[in-house]
Image (cartoon, coloured by chain):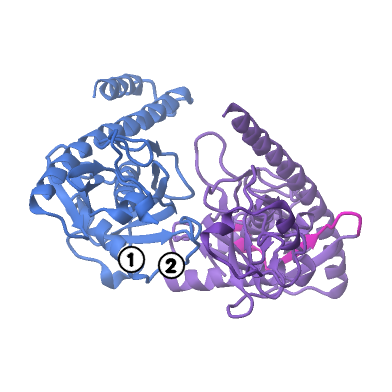
Chain colours: A purple, B blue
Amino acid sequence: MATVTISKAERSYIQTSLQAKPPLRADGRALLDYRTVLLETGVAPLANGSAKLNIGKTSGEGGGGTEILAATKLEVEDIENGEGVEGGRISCSVTCSPSAYPHISSNALDDLQYDYTTILQQTLSHPTLHPPNLGILPKKRSWLLSLDLVVVSDSGNVFDALFMAARAALWDTKVPRTRPVQYRANPSGRSSGDNMQVDQENDQETTSGFDTRQMAATAADFELPDYWDEGETLGGREKWPVCVTLNILPPVHFLDANVHEEASVPLRLLLAFSFPPNSSANLQAMRLLGPGELDLAQMKSLIAYGQKYAKDLFTALEVKLREEDTRRNVKARTRFAAR
Amino acid sequence: MSSRIEILNDGGYRSDGRRQYELRDITIDLTPQGTADGSASITHGLTQVSVSIFGPREAKQRSQTLHDRAILNVEVNVLPFSTGDRRRRGRSDRRILELAASIKSTFEPVVQTSLYPRSQIDIFVSVLQQDGGLLQACINATTLALASAGVPMFDFVCAVSGGVHSAAPLLDLTTLEENDLPHVTVAVMPRTKKVTLVTLETRLHVDRFADIFRLACDAGQTIHAEMRRAVKERTRTLVAAMGAGPRAGPGEHMDRDVVMDDTIIDY
């Protein structure tokens, strides 16, 4: 996991200042402060939903910060012959750009992106979070939602950033509306040219081939009705989890570590919480990273703390996502009106 | 599918409303990204590419270094959501390796590698969106990123793609046009008027080739003007930012700063 190596002296310097009273961090933050989080949705025009997230960009012109690009794409899958699953499925993948980790070899990079992918895939494709509207035709067609995340640059706290970006992209995802169609042979069996003049009575007994009122399991295919927006949002999008990483350096723990702080703590605890509306929080994933150890009582209190921090993060992200929704919908509406 | 699209209509307009020799919008962003020594992102219409440069620095693998010059290491990363249909391309995909090799061979004669023996310059290209002219965008972005990293080069490299529809040459093709037409990508060094790259993947009549080649060389000059403007603009803001901050050194440096400012404006 070591994406950066620091010397013993550096490590002890960082550790001592974190354990000092009051604790000191290089950028002057308190232990539980996050760096500035920047978020924009709808950045990839060819994706069904996308987001760009940056934690800790230096103000003004500078670069820096942990930057993640996330995008979702929907593909139709065949359930009978293809790989499709009833009700659709989600597949996550994380790519690490070599420019985010300029010092590690490409094999190490592969390992790293595999680690990230596993955690995201296991957490986000869990049945409790599965969106209800990924099916198209029962037993025939379903959507495959592929979520691709790219770590553009890494300056610490990648997991929180990945989960936030994933949540934003999934929130932004629009599932195209589909209408099942059923083809039925004309019962009269005539297919010559005089069939063109169809009178009203005749039409009532032989229903149209495009009648979708009984969208039963007999439907053979689907069509995409034309509509002004790109579709409906993913069901249950409030449930997507947020992750907080507690960097544990007994007796203190702190949030949003930069790369050097990450390299100098013995233990990191990843907690992914989901906050479904009108019910209590769910702990969706938990990982302990690093060589340190922790006893059970400490663990319990840390989880409780983690839930509190995750709730704060969740609330802030929710506000921002709703703001982005308004911004983009207002923009879309004015563009529509201006035509 | 392709039969429905009119490449060039009777009025002389192309499918996206451009004229024959018209280039797409070019947007250049030279703000630093991440920890890179230099970076640039460029958009040609809907094609968007971003390049980060690391180095010249010590090579990851010592065995690869050359005793008399720096080596260029190009890695291309095509993001899975950059095209219409999602497709993951690994690092060892043939098309990507080919793209990386073209970029490398384009820049090897241009970058002054002999100044940095036993070192490596990493060029990391990430393709954010593609709509035709991928190689051209990669090359232009790499030039700009190398310039912003301060890597010495003999000249800019400006690339542009061109194609021929029946007998009419077209410049800066989109994906739609690329699929239907024989197309060529030409990279020129505008100051010395040398050509560092010509790629043609389909057949083209020799007479037509001369036409489109000459035209692409001219278009390279236009792109060069655009790129130079962006680099100058960027340098100007940097100089202004230097002037705005508190002076670190003693007062006598003031004169030199003013002169520097002047030279940039007069350039």
B100 above or below A81? above
- The chain that hosts pointer 1 is B
In front of the other: A265 or A33: A33
Provide the residue span drawn in magenta: A260-279
Residue drawn 55% across the image and 46% down it: A43
Give the quadrant of residue A277: bottom right
Identity, as a three-letter code, of the amino acid under mark 2: Arg
In front of the other: A16 or B192: B192
- Most extreme residue toward the bottom is A81
Is residue B185 among what the camera can see?
yes
Q: Secondary structure at mark 1?
A: helix
- Most extreme residue toward the front is A194
Quadrant holding the C terminus of chain B: top left
- Most extreme residue toward the left is B207
Label annotation for residue B95: 1
- The chain that hosts pointer 2 is B
Residue A263 relative to residue A104: left or right: right
Label annotation for residue B89: 2
Label annotation for residue A186: none
Identity, as a three-letter code, of the amino acid under mark 1: Arg
**Label pair 1/2, CB-CB below 8 angstroms:** yes
Residue A72 location (% of width, % of height) = 60, 58
Residue B45 location (% of width, % of height) = 39, 41
